[in-house]
Image: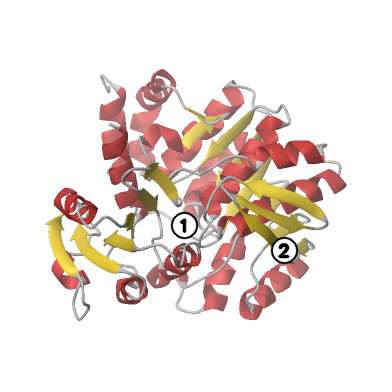
Amino acid sequence: MFENVQQAIDWIIKRRKSEHQFSDFYNYVKRINNPQDKLKCIHVGGTNGKGSTTNYLRNILQVAGYKVGSFTSPHLVTHLDRIRINDENITEEYFLNKCNENYKLWQQLDLTMFEIDMLISIDYFLDNKVDYVVYEVGLGGRLDATNIIKPLASVITNIDLEHTQILGNTIDKIAYEKAGIIKEKTTVITCEKKKEALIVFEKVCNEKQSKLIKTKKVTKLMENKGISFKYDNDKYFIPTAARYQINNAVLAVETIKQLNKENLLNIKEEDIKKGLLTNWAGRFETISENPKIIIDGAHNVSGIDALISSLNENEDYIFVFTALADKNYKLMLKKLVSKGEVIVTEFESNRKMRALDLAQGQDVLICHDYLIAIKHALTKNKTLIITGSLYFVSLIRNYFVK
């Protein structure tokens, strides 16, 4: 028995690996009569932008008056923020009770953290009678714990080289894993433009008798305390300086419009526009205006490219950067160095890179203590951007919130 929710969370987060296969988890939920099939879901996968797209979809549905569950990872403040209803975390009481009721069975089944979170989320959403759930894929797609759902639509943001030791070392191999969330006769929406990825999506859609929808061209109109853009003859606004969020917003808009066409939703255009007036924490988020501090969870090369695309040419930047060992940190760092001064640091993680190893061959300052790195960066009177890992950004955001 766990005496408090933190004990339960500590036990769960240690369960990151298991010897069993995804099919074992799939067969287990089948034995308990597939409770997830009672939920109306949208499934969001891809390399980058999953959390932001999930957040846009959640907010549009919520603005339209629906009760909406969402499942995201990693967490930003507490493990409980992975499972939310109308953007409110699962309650400590519910999470603790579920753990105490089931931990012996979960241990016997050798379930992983993601599988346990998935099971808790299903019960939580059913018990609270949500109207819709937006599920974000954790890793890959085909063998991800979320892939037990039968969604109304499968949404794939983009494809890039990441987790290559697990998903494959080419775009088409990774696209195949991500396309694993495509189900029979289901609409698939993507903003990916790479030909080798689209070939895979089209092949899988043909096999599954599913329809592939590619987002249309976007016209950026202006930037003023946010970004205005035109899509499919309609004008939209997102309250962020992150230009990379345009694609994620468009993907959410197109998904809602497709579900409207299929009579699976009935959401007004004005609610879609209102629903975009939200931000996803940790993505080009300004956490201080004076001094100017921005945090951005750019945790891979394409994430760094997206971050750089949002920089103002007339602004001076200094970056505090760290990365996990399984990322292409050399190229990530090289791109940041071309845009400003960089301080390389490190944080506690079983996948961390030492600051010395990260900095090899680059003209950067090394500071092992990330808090000292941040304090030093602030003496430069430049806009400070803290980036390189979602886990690191979560740690920093927590620190500043407190």
Q: Is residue 306 above or below residue 41?
A: below
Q: Give residue 193's position: percent from left, percent from top.
A: 65, 73
Give the residue number, with chain letter if any, for mark 2: 219
The amino acid type of the residue labelled 1 equals: Leu
Q: Give residue 368's position: percent from left, percent from top.
A: 13, 58
> In this view of the protein, can residue 308 be seen by the observer?
yes
Q: Is residue 38 above or below residue 16?
A: above
Residue appearing at x 34%, y 68% in the figure:
327
Residue appearing at x 86%, y 48% in the figure:
261
Mark 1 crowd level (few <14, some 14–19, many ≥20, 10 Å Cα): many
Numbered marks: total: 2
Residue appearing at x 45%, y 64% in the figure:
303
Q: Which mark is residue 139?
A: 1
Which quarter of the figure is the C terminus placed in? top left
Give the quarter of the image for residue 9.
Answer: top left
> In this view of the protein, can residue 11 be seen by the observer?
no
Give the quarter of the image for residue 106.
Answer: top left
- Closer to the camera: disc 2 or disc 1? 2
Q: Give residue 80's position: percent from left, percent from top.
A: 40, 32
The amino acid type of the residue labelled 2 equals: Thr
- Judge from the rendering whether residue 264 lies leftward or rightward of residue 53; answer left or right: right
How far is disc 2 from disc 1 in space, using C-alphas?
31 Å
Q: Is residue 247 above or below residue 255?
A: below
Give the quarter of the image for residue 39.
Answer: top right
Q: Which mark is residue 83?
A: none
At mark 2, the secondary structure is strand
Q: Is residue 249 above or below residue 179?
A: above
